[in-house]
Image (spheres, rainbow, N blue to C red):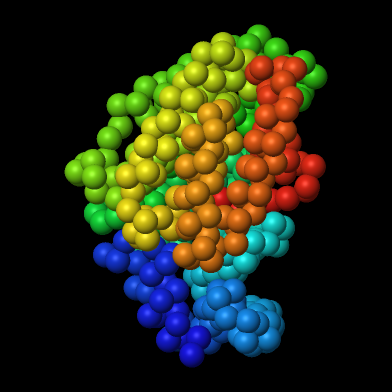
Amino acid sequence: MALRYYIQSFASTLSTNAENNGFLSILLPMAMTDAPLMDTLVAWSTSHLAIRQQNVQVKALEDRSVALRSFATNLRDLPPLTCLAICLVLTSMEAVLGNTLSWYSHLSAAARIINSTVSPRLDDSSLASSLDSSAEGRWLLRNFSYHDILASVSRSRAMLIPGLDFLGADAIQVPDTYLGFGVPPMKLLGEINVLSQTLTNYENTSNTASAAGDSSDAAEIAARLYAIEAELRQWRADGSPDDPLIMLADSYRSAILICLYRALRYHRLADPTTATQQIQAEVGEIVTRITSLPHGSSPECTLLFPLFMAGGEAQSTEHRAAIENRMETIAENREFQNLREALDVLKEVWSVQSRTTAIDPARPYDWTCVLERRQWDLALS
């Protein structure tokens, strides 16, 4: 039952496209020869099915127990590729279930596995992972980077593996499983995260919020952030503007621009009023696209990040209503519980903002305050 549900239904809800659904073309063949990975896929499948059908809930708990026990028992004998696959499935499973803590523990374990495979390249001084030598490994590394970059955004912390680029935008000839055509802007978001964290480190070291502007290194970082803004504004995915995958890619580009302007505003590298106006323009772009994106289309599966970033900054009731309605619809159709958790955070932000005025326009009350108070790790992937 669980495997049939995974193949016929669940896997298709996870991929932006049928052409390159790695959950079927990569994970499933691997699981056919690795029993612990198969146990994990079964647990993931029944866990999602149990959200739809109450009579499966006990079976789902049993399957999760079997999967964790199988992984722990066979850990020493499993190759790194299989261990990485299992950790990433566990990461996604906990995110889908709406867990606001343990998904990140599994992602951290995946990072440790990857780091154990990293060594210097023979032709230069850069580093590479031995997992990059196979199609399966490259897909899993891209899968990890997607989760790692978005976790860095939601946690306002450094990425687990900030120095290695696993997305490989130039090597992808078909739409990515998670990102469709949105890999290039996601690579830039990874860089934005690294630069913003470096600025935060400057500020924490000097104990003054204006230290970033006084550092020559920080000035170089600011220049690079503005260069990234230009790159993002110039970038366009190839294809028809009414293609759902193009709409998704452009929504990611706008969401990443929001992240960039938030960083510039937070580190006082831009006028807060100007940055906020630029953010509102991108919120409007995202709302326009999600209004046009067909309901139930495959790219909806990874629309949470653009929706959340737009919702966190949306000021008009019309924008907020459009975002809330789409998040509720996707959550109802796909039963991804992290969507419900994310919407609950946004509703608190909207409630607070509607009755208070931020003291510091550069650092207003927003979703980061909610997550800090709740001590949540929110999965946006």
Give the left or right position of residue 240, taking residue 69 as reference: left
Q: Is residue 101 above or below residue 67?
A: above
Give the left or right position of residue 75, taking residue 1 as reference: right
| Residue 169 pos. (x, y %) | 33, 46
- Residue at the (51%, 13%) spot, across then down: 274
| Residue 63 pos. (x, y %) | 63, 85
Q: Would you identify the image quadrant in which residue 216 lies?
A: top right
Q: In this figure, what is the number of numbered marks?
A: 0
Q: Would you identify the image quadrant in which residue 300 lies?
A: bottom left
Give the left or right position of residue 71, taking residue 149 as reference: right
| Residue 367 pos. (x, y %) | 66, 38
- Residue at the (67%, 33%) spot, across then down: 366
Give the left or right position of residue 127, taking residue 63 as reference: left
Q: Nearer the viewer, residue 153 or 326?
A: 326
Q: Nearer the viewer, residue 313 or 185?
A: 313
Q: Is residue 27 above or below residue 334?
A: below
- Residue at the (24%, 45%) spot, across then down: 242
Q: Nearer the viewer, residue 42 or 282?
A: 282
- Please identify the residue farthest to the left as the structure is shown: 240
Q: Is residue 204 visible?
A: yes
| Residue 7 pos. (x, y %) | 39, 80
Q: Nearer the viewer, residue 293 or 123?
A: 293
Q: Is residue 118 visible?
A: no
Q: Is residue 69 above or below residue 113?
A: below
Q: Is residue 321 above or below residue 53?
A: above
- Residue at the (65%, 9%) spot, across then down: 214
